[in-house]
């Protein structure tokens, strides 16, 4: 045990004393938050102008004017902007009416506007089909149809048609405004104890931030373990070390030592988050900003799942490092392990949408997905304690199994050079006594 402790101490101190660790501890949260904020920032800064020619076959000039008016007056308080500057994050549509007379060659007219749209992506056109107000059909043609602001245009058309129908039914503008006024849905979250607290997008932000932090830190430090093993093999230091330390002790010392470095970093981040969401609330509130409330229990779960996830993946990465002789080989060999880590990032939308479904519960029990998916479920819905404890128990059992397998392969693999072992050879290494 003393030898293991010496290796742990050496791995920990060598890494913690580096300038890279200090910079990473300070800069990494900022960079990760920036990565989360960038898509939102660019989404709100997107937009620009779209010149839309409306090929109007409806024969109802009031319909076009109603759509245009609805679109131009959507800046104050509608769901698209939610209090933000209405000029941000929205594509500004400029509508121009082009009446298509009955008998006019519509295909030739559309072809003309298609060619314009192909040359200029900011020039588009829309067709108001014949059919009157009771059978309104609209088609939108543009080079880019993935612009989220098209939803704003769609809602503007729907509101305009509804308002015009109410007007022709005999209602005055005040009644129409009152009847079509949007209702804001206030979201309240029912907690595990049966209480009620304010919910909303903050839950998603907190859950995704924790998912992302666990994913990034487990990946970074797991790869660090793998590279450490490869470096010792390449420098032949390992041949000296095995004369005084058993390979299994070396592996455990390296995994625990680097794990403590990661835990130190995560602990600093968790403490910073706690201070930011407690002492910092009043400071941000005074500036009109709302900070998400992160309970202490959530931070404790975050640290526990990070530790379990790290040991599970670090063991697997150490195993990979022991079976290869170079970084190039490691790039290929570590892909299956990394894919296990990436899968939760690809399916987290399903978990967020229905975190209490059977599929979500089952997926969060899989030990390779539990560090991220169970953590996300805890942040969103507070699952029953037995589910949390069961996932932790399954992870612990899996870690012990992986340590046993990795230790038996590691003790042979670190002294092997040259050709990468096949699956059959790895099986023989496992059976060596």
Image (tube, helix red, strand yellow):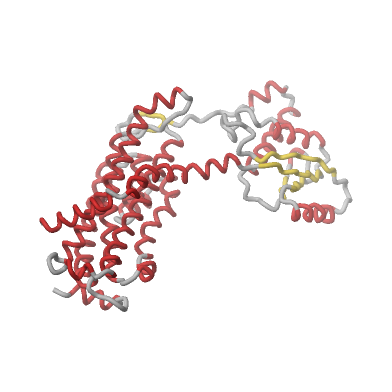
Residue 23 lies, in percent from the top left, at: 36, 45
Q: Is residue 140 left or right of residue 29?
A: right
30 left or right of 396 in image: right
> Residue 107: x and y, percent?
82, 56
Image position, residue 405 (x, y; %): 22, 66
Observer-nearest of 412 and 305? 412
Where is residue 93, by image quadrant? Answer: top right
Q: Is residue 328 above or below residue 203?
A: below
Furthest residue toward left:
2
| Above/below status of 275 relative to 105 | above
Q: Quadrant of the N terminus?
A: bottom left
Residue drawn at (74%, 55%) of the image: 118
Vertical comparison of 138 with 343: above or below: above
Query: Looking at the image, is 275 positioned above or below residue 337?
Result: above
Identified at 30% across, 37% down, the residue is 271
Residue 417 found in image quarter: bottom left
């Amino acid at each position: 045990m003393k030898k293991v402790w010496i290796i742990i101490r050496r791995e920990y101190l060598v890494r913690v004393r580096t300038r890279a660790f200090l910079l990473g501890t300070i800069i990494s949260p900022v960079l990760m938050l920036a990565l989360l904020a960038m898509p939102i920032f660019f989404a709100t800064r997107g937009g620009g102008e779209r010149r839309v020619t409306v090929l109007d076959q409806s024969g109802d000039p009031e319909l076009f004017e109603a759509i245009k008016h609805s679109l131009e007056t959507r800046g104050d308080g509608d769901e698209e902007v939610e209090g933000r500057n209405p000029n941000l994050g929205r594509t500004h549509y400029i509508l121009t009416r082009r009446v298509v007379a009955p008998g006019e060659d519509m295909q030739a007219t559309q072809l003309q506007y298609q060619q314009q749209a192909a040359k200029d992506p900011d020039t588009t056109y829309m067709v108001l089909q014949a059919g009157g107000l009771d059978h309104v059909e609209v088609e939108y043609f543009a080079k880019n149809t993935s612009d989220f602001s098209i939803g704003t245009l769609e809602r503007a058309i729907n509101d305009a048609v509804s308002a015009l129908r109410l007007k022709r039914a005999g209602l005055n503008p005040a009644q129409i405004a009152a009847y079509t006024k949007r209702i804001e849905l206030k979201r309240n979250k029912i907690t595990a104890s049966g209480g009620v607290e304010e919910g909303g997008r903050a839950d998603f932000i907190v859950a995704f931030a924790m998912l992302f932090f666990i994913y990034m830190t487990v990946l970074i430090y797991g790869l660090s373990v793998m590279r450490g093993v490869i470096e010792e093999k390449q420098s032949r230091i390992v041949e000296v070390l095995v004369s005084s330390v058993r390979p299994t002790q070396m592996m455990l010392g390296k995994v625990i030592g680097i794990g403590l470095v990661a835990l130190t970093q995560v602990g600093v981040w968790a403490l910073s988050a706690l201070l930011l969401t407690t002492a910092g609330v009043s400071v941000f509130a005074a500036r009109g900003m709302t900070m998400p409330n992160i309970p202490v229990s959530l931070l404790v779960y975050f640290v526990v799942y990070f530790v379990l996830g790290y040991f599970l993946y670090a063991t697997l990465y150490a195993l990979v490092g022991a079976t290869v002789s170079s970084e190039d080989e490691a790039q290929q060999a570590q892909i299956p392990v990394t894919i296990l880590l990436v899968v939760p990032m690809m399916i987290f939308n399903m978990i967020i949408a229905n975190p209490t479904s059977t599929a979500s519960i089952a997926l969060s029990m899989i030990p390779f997905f539990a560090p991220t998916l169970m953590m996300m479920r805890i942040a969103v819905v507070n699952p029953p304690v037995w589910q949390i404890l069961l996932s932790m128990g399954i992870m612990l059992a899996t870690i012990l199994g992986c340590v046993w397998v990795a230790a038996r392969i590691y003790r042979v693999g670190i002294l092997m050079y040259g050709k990468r072992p096949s699956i059959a050879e790895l099986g023989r290494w496992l059976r060596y006594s």
